[in-house]
Image: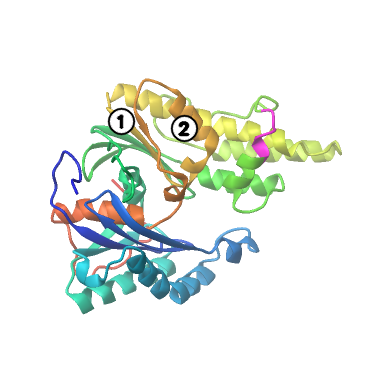
Amino acid sequence: MSNSKNNFPPARILAIESSCDETAAAVLENGRVLLSSVVASQIDLHTQYGGVFPEVASRQHIRTIYGVVDQALEKAHMSLENMDAVAVTRGPGLAGSLVVGMNMAKGLVLGNQLPLIGVNHLEGHIYSAWLYPAETPVPPPAPEFPILALLVSGGHSELNLITNHLEYQRLGSTLDDAAGEAFDKTARLIGLPYPGGPSVQKAAVNGDPKRFNFPRALQDGSYNFSFSGVKTAVLRTVRELEIQNAPLPVEDLAASFQTAVIEVLFDKTMKAAQEYKVKSIVVAGGVSANQQLRDTFLSQQKFPVFIPPLKYCTDNAAMIAAAGYYRFVHGKTDNLDIDVLPTWPLS
């Protein structure tokens, strides 16, 4: 199966992802062709805490990781003998969660004499734009370099210029709350359940995005982001309404907040894309599942935009396999003494 016009050598990668609260494994062929992807979610476990409880997450990874890896291989109709390498998320993420996946990967490569590839989780999100299921009749085009990647997740909001595979230049990042954090915190402020992203999106559908004029932060020409201000503006508005004994207009608050965040993400991305004369835009990470964000980017006509299908926006191992493949074919493998990196910038 041809991978792309870059004509890299064929390879099958088994990948493991356990950076936060999803235990995942996947089998990928030639950097793009997805043979299987299995994700065991922990959302129900953490809902009672209003967020991810690290110790609970790592314990659950231990319980599920063997079954998840076995299921991924079974769904791909493959065994470890058919794999060319094992990729695993090295960081960033929760230390206790990362260690579970890393130790599993090390055991597999040690027992089967396979190369080990430590993958940056953020790099994985970018490479989710390359994925397509094996049963796809006609392979979709891959993003063309140079690429501008907008990474938006619970812990990260940043813009990266990608000139070639594995070559990143960070143009800007969040100075405080990431977009996903702001969604979660705002959801709590207006009484919506965890996880905040889907809850805010659902409430915003019937809301008035112009009801509240929340701030669009850092209109300073930079490519950095700041979302603590809009979150604070929501808090102030909620408190004012409570003092007035007025009913909380949850839908309008959600719609106004969501629009304020998305406008900033879109405007800065488009400005950077034009300045650096990119050929493609990739929007990835958990927040890229937001329908208004997707619609906003896909409605413009200036640049081809690649946004992964919803199931590859949130944490998964398929994206780790894709990034792992490109590291593998560029000779970037790791020794068994590598450790996890809870803090690990992409560039």
**Image quadrant where residue 303 sits:** top left
Q: Which amino acid type is marked by label 2?
A: Leu
Q: Which residue is mark 2?
A: 265
Q: Examine the rendering and report whether any part of residue 176 can be seen.
A: no
Is 130 drawn above or below residue 120 in the view shown?
above
Q: Residue at x 43, y 22 (%)?
A: 300
Image location of residue 152, percent across then percent down: 44, 42
Q: Is residue 96 above or below residue 227?
A: below
- Residue bounds of the magenta highlight: 203-208
Percent from the top left, x then y, of residue 145? 23, 33
> Which residue lies at the image location 59% right of the left edge and 29% below the top edge?
215
Please, which residue is most extreme toward the bottom here? 111
Disc 1 residue type (three-letter): Ser
* Residue that carries the numbered disc 1 in the rendered image: 280
Instruction: List x then y, in percent, for residue 2.
Output: 18, 46
The residue located at (33%, 51%) in the rendering is: 124
Count of residue discs: 2
- Which residue in the rendered view is the most extreme toward the right? 245
